[in-house]
Structure formats: structure tokens, C-alpha cells
Amino acid sequence: MKTLLKISVIVFLLMNYSCKAQMVQTTKDVYLLKTNEQQFINKPLKDLLKEIKPEIRTADTSIDSPYFFRFKFITYEQQRTNKGNWEDRVSLYVYVKEPIDWKWEKRPKGNELIWTKEDAEKYGNLAVVRIKVINQPKE
């Protein structure tokens, strides 16, 4: 009986751990990153990125202090023509401790702002120091 109880508890804990949902399910939820900012401070950027389900379409950076990424969930064309849902136009600013090695001249011509999996891997270990969200969803 004790063994059955122990196994049940272990299975329950494993299921609970593996079923954890991402914090940001839609662009309306991006503000939750700011609300839960302390959870990400001094942690790698990759931990924050794991919590975001909507695809990050574009990224811009500041290579001078303060160092930050500006993530957008719409394409550059949508940004330029001011198209897309209000919620999708949100900007997520993630400030990091270390300088960002972002070489504009080495990025693919015409696609300099596109955020890629390679970018996530390259910059994933930078430590987050601050999160800012601009254009919060209308209620």
C-alpha cells in the first residue's frame, strides 16, 4: 500500500511538472513578463524566451549601454505600414548585462531585423536585468 502511494505521488509530481504551460500564450499576455520580472532577473535570456509562445518576428538591439533587445511579434512590413492587431504591435524590451555582439553588416541583407533560432542560441546566455513592455493591450 505504501509503495502504491509513493508511486502515485511521484507520477502526480512528474505530470504536474511536465504540464507546465508557457507564461505568454498570446501577445495579450506579454505584460505578464513584466509582472513576473523578478523571476527572470539575473537569469539567462533563454529562460525568458522559453516562456513565450507567440513567434518573435523581429528584433532590434542597442549595442551601446544600456544593452537591450526589442522584440516584436509582427513583421517589419506590418510595422512599417502600421498593420496587424493592436495586441500584436506590443514591443518587449529585454535589457541584458553584457554587450550584445550584433553585427548589422553580417546579417542577411534585407532581413537584418528577423529574429532566428540561431540568434536565440547565440544570445541565450546573456543575463536579463530588466524587462519593459510597450503598447500594452487595450482592455
Image (cartoon, rainbow, N blue to C red):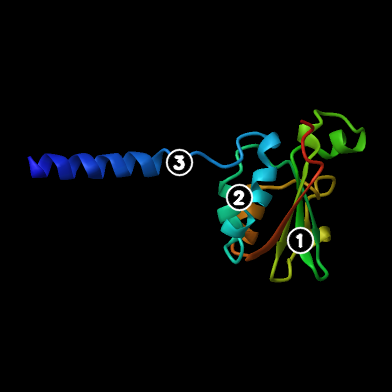
Give x and y (percent) for residue 74: 78, 36
The structure residue drawn at horizontal position 79% and vertical position 58%, both measured from the top left corner, is 61
Which residue is under mark 2? 49
Q: Is residue 137 above or below residue 120?
A: above
| Helix, strand or loop at mark 1 | strand
Give x and y (percent) for residue 34: 68, 51
| Helix, strand or loop at mark 2 | helix
| Helix, strand or loop at mark 3 | loop
The structure residue drawn at horizontal position 60% and vertical position 35%, both measured from the top left corner, is 25
Badge 3, how many Cα within 10 Å: few under 14, some, many 20+? few
Circle on res. 20:
3
The amino acid marked with disc number 2 is Leu
The amino acid marked with disc number 3 is Lys
- In the rendered view, does 44 fall on the left or right side of 90? left
The structure residue drawn at horizontal position 74% and vertical position 39%, both measured from the top left corner, is 73
Which residue is under mark 1? 68
The structure residue drawn at horizontal position 60% and vertical position 59%, both measured from the top left corner, is 38
Rounded to the nearest whole Å, what is the CA distance between mark 3 and mark 2? 15 Å
Badge 1, how many Cα within 10 Å: few under 14, some, many 20+? many
- In the rendered view, does 63 fall on the left or right side of 25? right
- The answer to which of marks 3 and 1 sits earlier in the sequence is 3
- The answer to which of marks 3 and 2 sits earlier in the sequence is 3
* Residue 110: quarter of image: top right
